[in-house]
């Protein structure tokens, strides 16, 4: 039971540290903006025109990776290996993000 309490304590400590870090960094950013004469409440977020493309290709790549993992584990290897599932999902999602980056880069270079 001591190991369970230790793990729970580490999780709570990590969660608290994460929240503290986020609040601390946000306040530092606001203080830096005030030092430069800017009002932090007037700053608008930057537009992200390719956000939907990025998420769409991420999900598409992950789905293709999931399907590929199913085909390989069921029909070629005849075994259940969870590591392969996670690996193919990550590889597919990463490939989707790379394709998204290339499309965005091509659009930006074409505009210039």
Image (cartoon, rainbow, N blue to C red):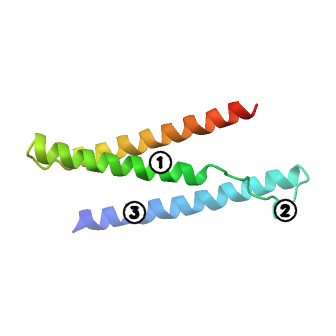
Q: Nearer the viewer, mark 1 or mark 3?
A: 1
Image location of residue 82, percent across then percent down = 20, 50
Q: Crowdedness of circle 3 by 10 Å Cα count: few (<14), some, many (20+)?
A: few
The residue beneath circle 1 is 57
- Using the image, tell me which numbered label, if any, was put on residue 42: 2
Image location of residue 5, percent across then percent down = 30, 68
Q: CA distance from mark 3 to mark 2?
A: 36 Å
Q: CA distance from mark 2 to mark 1?
A: 33 Å
27 to 101, vertically: above or below? below
3 and 2 marks in contact (CB < 8 Å): no
Label 2 sits on a secondary structure element that is loop
Residue ranking furthest to the front: 110
Does 109 sit left or right of 82 as displayed? right
Q: Nearer the viewer, mark 2 or mark 1?
A: 1
Q: Residue at x 54, y 48 (%)?
A: 54
Q: CA distance from mark 1 to mark 3?
A: 32 Å
Q: Residue at x 43, y 66 (%)?
A: 12
Q: Earlier in the sequence, mark 3 or mark 2?
A: 3
Does 69 sit left or right of 98 as displayed? left
Does 46 sit left or right of 65 as displayed? right
Image location of residue 22, percent across then percent down = 61, 58
- Using the image, tell me which numbered label, if any, was put on residue 5: none
1 to 94, vertically: above or below? below
Q: Earlier in the sequence, mark 2 or mark 1?
A: 2
Q: Residue at x 86, y 55 (%)?
A: 34
- Using the image, tell me which numbered label, if any, was put on residue 11: 3
């Amino acid at each position: 039971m001591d190991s369970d309490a230790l793990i729970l304590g580490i999780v709570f400590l990590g969660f608290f540290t994460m929240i503290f870090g986020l609040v601390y960094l946000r306040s530092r950013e606001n203080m830096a903006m005030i030092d430069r004469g800017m009002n932090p409440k007037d700053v608008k977020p930057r537009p992200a025109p390719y956000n939907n493309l990025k998420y769409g290709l991420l999900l598409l790549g992950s789905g293709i990776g999931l399907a590929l993992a199913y085909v390989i584990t069921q029909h070629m290897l005849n075994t259940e290996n969870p590591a392969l599932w996670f690996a193919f999902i990550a590889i597919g999602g990463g490939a989707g993000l790379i394709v998204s980056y290339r499309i965005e880069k091509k659009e930006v270079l074409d505009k210039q």
